Image: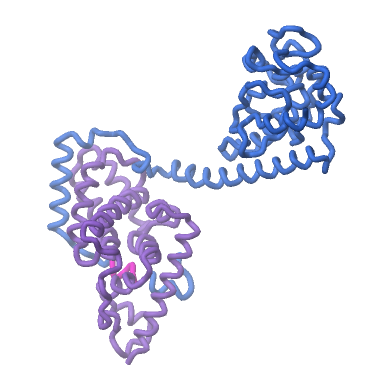
Amino acid sequence: MWRGEIAVPAALLAAAVRGGEVDPVGEERAVAAFRAARDEGALAVRGTRRRDDWRPARERRRRRSLRAAAMGLAATVLLGGVAVAAQSGAIRSPFGGGNGGGDGGGAVPKPGVSTAATPSRAVPAAPLAERPRGKQHRPTARPTHSVRPSDTGTKTVGRPEGKPTPNTPNTPKQGPKSGGRKAGTAGGSGAPGAKRGAEPGAGGNSGTGAGGGAATGAGTGGHAGTGRMTPGPKTGNAGMNPPHTNGNGDGKAEATAR
Amino acid sequence: MGAYDAELGAAVERAQQGDEDAFARAYRLVHPGLLGYVRGLVGDDAEDVAAEAWLEIARDLGRFRGDGAGFRGWTATIARHRALDHLRRQKRSPRTSLIEQDVLDLPGGQDTAAAALESLSTEQALAMIRGLPREQAEAVLLRVVVGLDGPATARVLGKRPGAVRSAAHRGLRKLAGRLAQGGARG
């Protein structure tokens, strides 16, 4: 364990300090305390507080989770950087022009989304303009939305409509949000509903999804939002949410997009 | 240390079921290292502080979960709290025990590490450790005297493993230097 110049003092200390101390008085006192505690029923108190838990598996998890949290943060920051770059135009949005993403609500959320961090923001500009913001859920197909995203079929990719709620009432989503969103997100938080349009949403999700996905292994919420996209009324899709924003990150995105 | 951890783990488990002989066995395996650690922190009052720690260990034994190595970490944490409380009550810093210079004088004529090792007493070893900065002293004590691994030491101290590793190495290097000086002294 100890090498080089410090091996000697280490061994020395270990030997000197631990050297066979016999302590019968101390031992008897401790055993008496043990007996008293046992007889009072203290041993039966099994509530293990965090500080009492020194199990090897937990220790391993604790150490791993510290590393994982660091990696998750790094992944989020990295993806956030990509999203920002895409927004600013430094890199091309994988979703193509605004039309693709924006209209159709969701047309087909690009499956690739999950990987791309691009914020959907790029997408939507045009379509959004057309669509009234506000309470509509699905821009094209349906007027009032109570349809679940899955209905729209835009969502496509997958996500089983696990969450209808986001789409409903409180979120003024445009286009098929939830569906789209989900699609892209691998492991994303199911909530994407907030995002608008499939693409953007998807993009958004994907960003987060990816972040989330990447981070999940790490055991952290990973993405910026913390894993939960609030359904809130977000129209624009923030795309990748910067780590510090809450799931939606829309605020910022919206502003720009619109 | 590691060699006895399996036996310690078994003893702790039996003790948790009420077996007092098992508890005595655990005490014998853990106490020397624990006392050494506490002595490094508080000096002369170490026996009293360690006894207080054992009261708390006996009382909370039912809550502990872990193996032999984990028990060492858990008991070291309890001992550390008692030691720091003691120091606060006494309004003393952990390193106030003055290092008497003659304690550090190793027997003359020793020019080999082995000889130094044989003649270094517990008091001298601990006095040398107490001469280190607090963080280094604790890291060295927990690693070498109590026998905890790096991560467990970091957990007891509430510090990052990297910082603890550096502190232990720095402390041991300093001690190595002092040993060399002592040995050279005629």
Looking at the image, can residue A209 be seen? no
- The x and y percentages for residue A161 are 67, 16
Q: Residue at x 82, y 19 (%)?
A: A107
Q: Residue at x 22, y 37 (%)?
A: A43
The N terminus of chain A lies in which quarter of the figure?
bottom left
Question: Does the magenta segment cover residue A186?
Answer: no
Q: Residue at x 17, y 60 (%)?
A: A23
Q: Residue at x 25, y 70 (%)?
A: B97
Instruction: Say if B129 sits above or below A79 in the image.
Output: below
- The prevailing secondary structure element of the residues shown in magenta is helix
Residue placed most toward the observer, B162 or A257: A257
- Image quarter of residue B89: bottom left
Image mark count: 0
Q: Is residue B167 left or right of residue A180?
A: left
The C terminus of chain A lies in which quarter of the figure?
top right
Residue placed most toward the observer, A207 or A127: A127
Residue closest to the far bottom: B186
Instruction: Say if B131 sits above or below A71 in the image.
Output: below
Question: Does the magenta segment cover residue A14?
Answer: yes
Q: Is residue B119 left or right of residue A235?
A: left
Residue placed most toward the observer, B126 or B158: B158
Which residues, given as a range, are shown in magenta? A13-17
Looking at the image, can residue A204 be seen? yes
- The x and y percentages for residue A206 are 72, 31
The chain coloured purple is B
- The x and y percentages for residue B138 are 36, 62
Q: Is residue B159 left or right of residue A172?
A: left
Tint of chain A: blue
Residue placed most toward the observer, A249 or A116: A249
- The x and y percentages for residue A255 are 73, 30
- Image quarter of residue A215: top right
Q: Is residue A87 left or right of residue A22?
A: right
